[in-house]
Image (cartoon, rainbow, N blue to C red):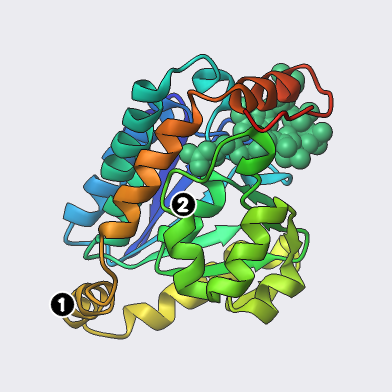
Amino acid sequence: MKNYNNILTETEGAIGMITINRPKQLNALNKETIAELHEAFDNFNRDENINVIIVTGSGEKAFVAGADIKEFMNFDAVQGRELAAKGQELLFDFVENLETPVIAAINGFALGGGLELALASHIRIASDNAKMGLPEVSLGVIPGYGGTQRLAQIIGKGRAMEMILTAEMINADTALNYGLVTEVVPQAELMIAAKNKAQKLLKNSPKAQSFAIKALNAAYTKTGFEVEKDLFGQAFATADFKEGTTAFVERRKAEFTGK
Ligand code: CAA
């Protein structure tokens, strides 16, 4: 297995496992991590011996706490749009359209880009301490890795609108109730549950599963994703974005002016 700086990969039979491994930053997705994830997903997808992929976060606290705020806080509108477009291409669209099914094992905070990675995965299960949300508007920006589209596809527009506009997190039980995840287990049992789920998938035809993924995905249009990228970029040119990201780094409450 290749050595990466920000992720770990291993295999167990026909299961490929990817662990995002920046626990001190709560596994936040910087550019390098996204590039490494792309490569790892691509390699497992091409490997004929791997028929299911599990993605999780290292440590007991976080799956992924979002895109790396410190990396993008000084970006302008053009760079903001590019961040969303490149991330979608390399990771979020890429995962959603993989031939190999991906199970997200959500072991803690799944926020912003972290929840968006879980949403792009084909199956989501969570540990009972997991917290999920799209807190971007509290930073003066919007979800840019497909969250405005996929959250509504999965839990319905009403609940998605409320989660995105309030920026609040939901717990694992609420996520189960919303259909955002399909199973909740104690944290110590999460990887066992993910592997059990993988074993169920491994009984079936990989070729037919890849066709099924393609057919299910075909129901959703791409227009909304383009609108999301444009508006994500536009948000980077606002005073509220500067205030929101600066307040996060300074560990204070943001004072938004609506400008
Ligand atoms: N980006 C960069 N660093 C992050 C991060 C992120 N998304 N989330 C956490 N960290 C860092 C913190 O800055 C902190 O670093 P230092 O020790 O160097 O200060 C470290 O990880 C530990 O985090 P906290 O001390 O904040 O831990 P906590 O337990 O007090 O709070 C938390 C946990 C509620 C998850 C909090 O860290 C948090 O709110 N994180 C940000 C969540 C967020 O807003 N995510 C959305 C990002 S924007 C996005 O994803 C855009 C997109 O769609 C493309």
Residue 245: mark: none
Residue 207: mark: 1
- Residue 199, how many percent across, how many down? 42, 77
The residue depicted at 21 percent of the width and 83 percent of the height is 205
The residue depicted at 28 percent of the width and 85 percent of the height is 204
Disc 2 marks which amino acid?
A: Leu
Disc 1 marks which amino acid?
A: Lys
- Residue 42, how many percent across, how many down? 23, 47
- Residue 31, how many percent across, how many down? 40, 26
Question: Separation of disc 1 and disc 2 at Cα?
Answer: 24 Å
Quick check: 151 left or right of 244?
left
Q: Which residue is mark 2?
A: 117
Quadrant assignment, res 81 = top left
Quadrant assignment, res 35 = top left
Quick check: 68 left or right of 49?
right
Q: Nearer the viewer, residue 178 or 31?
A: 178
Quarter of the C terminus within the rendering: top right
Q: Nearer the viewer, residue 152 or 28?
A: 152
State which mark lies toward you, 1 or 2.
2
Secondary structure at badge 1 equals: helix
Whichever of callouts 1 and 2 sits on the residue coming sooner in the sequence is 2
